[in-house]
Image (cartoon, rainbow, N blue to C red):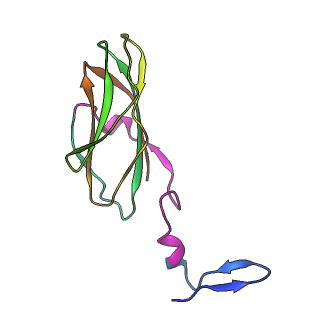
Amino acid sequence: MSIALDGSAGITFPSTSVQGDAGIGYGQTWQNMTSSRAINGTSYTNSTTKPIMISVIATATAAATTLKTTIAGNVISQGFGSNSIDSDINSNPIIIPVGATYSVAPSVGSATLVAWWELR
């Protein structure tokens, strides 16, 4: 497949398939998944055809809570923590590869889910 440069219009693609295969964010929107997600280590699968990104907000219900994100069984990130009860805690935004399983859970203490957003 070739890509042609047009001096006045920039790059033109021979078909929309190249644009459809563009990276994360192209053709995706942030979706509120709060009602269908839990921060108790429940595993979900990215069954889309593109990588997705997740961002989670919770409220600490026990002191010293942090959120850890696990992808394919590996702890990839441990988000911002709180040393006080009823404080907001956040996961780091994480990219989830196609077909990968992922979960979010408190690593210490407990938390209540406030919002779970996915760019999909």
Q: Residue at x 41, y 27 (%)?
A: 80
**Which secondary structure type mostly characterizes the magenta part of the structure?**
loop
In the image, is residue 36 above or below residue 114?
below
Q: Is residue 76 left or right of residue 8?
A: left
The picture places residue 110, in percent across and down from the top left corner, at 26, 19
Q: Residue at x 19, y 46 (%)?
A: 73
Frontmost residue, 56 versus 71: 71
The picture places residue 87, in percent across and down from the top left corner, at 42, 15
In the image, is residue 6 above or below residue 63?
below
The picture places residue 100, in percent across and down from the top left corner, at 26, 55
Q: Quadrant of residue 7?
A: bottom right
Q: Residue at x 33, y 25 (%)?
A: 66
Q: Is residue 28 left or right of residue 91?
A: right
Highlighted magenta segment, given as a residue range: 18-40
Q: Is residue 15 left or right of residue 97?
A: right
Frontmost residue, 10 versus 81: 81
Q: Quadrant of residue 89?
A: top left
In the image, is residue 103 above or below residue 45?
above
Residue closest to the far bottom: 1
Whether residue 114 is in magenta: the answer is no
Whether residue 20 is in magenta: the answer is yes
Q: Is residue 80 left or right of residue 103?
A: right
Residue closest to the far right: 8
